[in-house]
Each structure stands twice: as structure tokens, then as C-alpha cells.
Image (tube, rainbow, N blue to C red):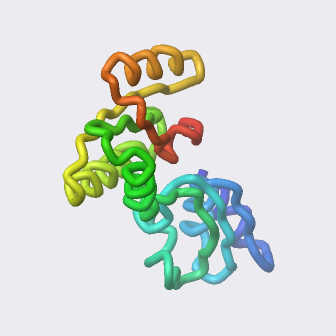
Amino acid sequence: MAGTWQSNIAGRKAKAIDCRNSPPALAAKAATATIPIVFSGGGDPVKLGLVASLSRPGGNATGVTNIATELIAKRLQLLRELAPTATVISVLVNPASPNADDQIEEVRAAARVVGQEIHFVRARSESEFDAAFADIVGRRAPQATVSPSSRSRAA
């Protein structure tokens, strides 16, 4: 894909490149360091190498992402406030999401800080939801949160 971008962009004088998700944004970044790139997507743009940091992207790429790992600790805190006697909190995760591993680690880190036991429930699609929720009920961990990765589709 990058070869196609390079041959198409290099000879044109585009004012900007609008990319709807990460793969085209990565290809555009590989093709040009001067044309502004605006992206949106579900991946972490820092980890993907699109930007230097979220607060100061640098370079010629900027955009938005629906990744919200920095909010995971806050969600866990709010859930604990709503259910202060919960001994286990379930977290529904889509293991097919490219962000699932990062989000699981963020939840684990946040849970360690507050001493909360976490039970991860995995569901790749709507067809797996019934089994996932039966697992949550069966473990008597009805307090649940949905990882942002559960709402995104697999790449």
C-alpha cells in the first residue's frame, strides 16, 4: 500500500491528506513528510508511530483517536464508587481488537493500585455476548465495565 501512496502522492501537490483509519495514515506518513496528514482511528497513534506524543504530535500528522486507555483507571474508580462492596469487577474485552492487550494491561495496572480483583470476559462478536454475560453472572461478578476495545471492530 505504501508504494501506491508514494507514487500517487509524490507527484501531486495535495494540500492535505485525510485518512479515516490507521493503515492509510501510516502509508501517507511513509510517503510524505511535508503534506499535512489528518487521521482518525482506533489505534494508539503514538505506538503506531504516527505522532511523537498525544499532546505534541510533531511532524506532519495529527488527528483523533477513540482510544481512551488513560480513562480506564477513572472508569474503574467510578464503578467502585457505585458498587463499593464488589469483590470482583468483570471487564468485557474484544480480543480481536488491536488495542485489547494494551487495554487489558491498563485495567490490570489500575486494579493493582486500588487492590481490585478483575475478571476478564472475552467476546469477539455479538454472537458471543450471551456466553460472556452468563460467565459474569456465574462468577458472581455482576459489576462490569466494557473495555473500549469491545466496541471497536477487528482490523
Q: Residue at x 51, y 47 (%)?
A: 148
Left or right of 91? Residue 63 is right
Left or right of 17? Residue 80 is left
Residue 155 in the image, given as x and y percentages of width and height: 55, 39
Where 48 sits versus 33, above or below? Answer: above
In the rendered image, which quarter is residue 119 located in? Answer: top left
Q: Give whichever of 24, 10 is nearer the camera.
A: 24
In the rendered image, which quarter is residue 78 located in? Answer: bottom left
Q: Residue furthest front?
A: 85
Q: Residue at x 44, y 21 (%)?
A: 132
In the rendered image, which quarter is residue 70 located in? Answer: bottom left
Residue 45 in the image, given as x and y percentages of width and height: 50, 65
Where 143 sits versus 112, above or below? Answer: above
Q: Give whichever of 73, 35 is nearer the camera.
A: 73
Q: Give whichever of 103, 3 is nearer the camera.
A: 103
Q: Residue at x 47, y 44 (%)?
A: 147
Residue 71 in the image, given as x and y percentages of width and height: 46, 61
| Whether residue 13 can be seen here | no
Q: Residue at x 24, y 57 (%)?
A: 114
